[in-house]
Image (spheres, helix red, strand yellow):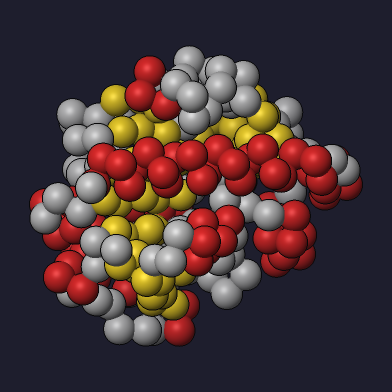
Amino acid sequence: MRIHSLQHASFEGLGSIETWARHNGLSLYTSRMFANDTLPSPDDFDWLVVMGGPMNIYEEDRFPWLRQEKELIKQAIAGGKVVLGICLGAQLIADALGEKVTRNQHREIGWFPLTTIHPAMAGIIADGAMVMHWHGDTFDLPPGAERLAKSAACLNQGFIYNQRVVGLQFHLEITAEGLAALIDHCRDELTPGPYVQTPEAMLARPERFPPLNQMMSSLLDHLRLLAD
């Protein structure tokens, strides 16, 4: 199985997704959008993983590669590929499916629980699961998609579309090292708000990362079973 990821920032990599792929002996390729790497053809991969990033999906003038990336996502979905989007990636998938992405009422950065988990995620994400968030935008549910979860700060924390397409507004893949890098590069986003935690609070409990990454592994296992 061939996994191709789209990386939007040098400091925001695959995290535990890479660990899972290597453990399962899967082929893993990456297009570094920030370095203007060439995009693959949909025939070149089985899964497309679209990662997060500090830019917005509507900043095509600043990041012209967004246009080509959105087209590739559309082609991958139309071709029946597994497509997983995280944070910005989920917003790009929502846009590719014809739904709008807008500013969320609250910026949500830190550890906050998910509720109202979709039944398809039973055994993968528990109701009340504490997960890592880092976003200021949100999306409406694309036509035909089902809400995956919500939080106090954000109604649409994710969606499932045609079983094989999943968008996560939150970060199950992030490691302690990845979060430290995100804080270092995006510290300017940590403006005071009801759902914005301090760097110290976000890094205070390293025991949260293993169960977080286990949820990601379980989700990837679930998608692999659907694809086989």
The x, y position of residue 78, in whole percent, is 11, 52
The x, y position of residue 65, in whole percent, is 32, 74
Q: Quadrant of residue 75?
A: bottom left
Residue at (56, 22) in percent of width and height: 126
Residue that lies at the very extreme toward the left in this rendered image: 78
Quarter the N terminus occupies? bottom left
Q: Is residue 228 above or below residue 186?
A: above
Instruction: Answer with left or right where residue 42 lies relative to residue 196.
Output: left
Q: Can the viewer see residue 187?
A: no
Instruction: Answer with left or right where residue 35 lies relative to residue 146.
Output: right
Q: Is residue 61 above or below residue 217?
A: below
Instruction: Answer with left or right where residue 96 lies relative to residue 213.
Output: left
Instruction: Answer with left or right where residue 197 lies relative to residue 150.
Output: right
Residue at (63, 52) in percent of width and height: 174
Q: Quadrant of residue 160?
A: top left
Q: Is residue 104 above or below residue 19?
A: above
Residue at (29, 25) in percent of width and height: 146
Towards the viewer: 30 or 38: 30
Towards the viewer: 18 or 108: 18
Q: How many marks?
A: 0
Residue at (42, 46) in percent of width and height: 220
The x, y position of residue 148, in whole percent, is 40, 27
Q: Can the viewer see residue 78?
A: yes
The x, y position of residue 172, in whole percent, is 57, 44
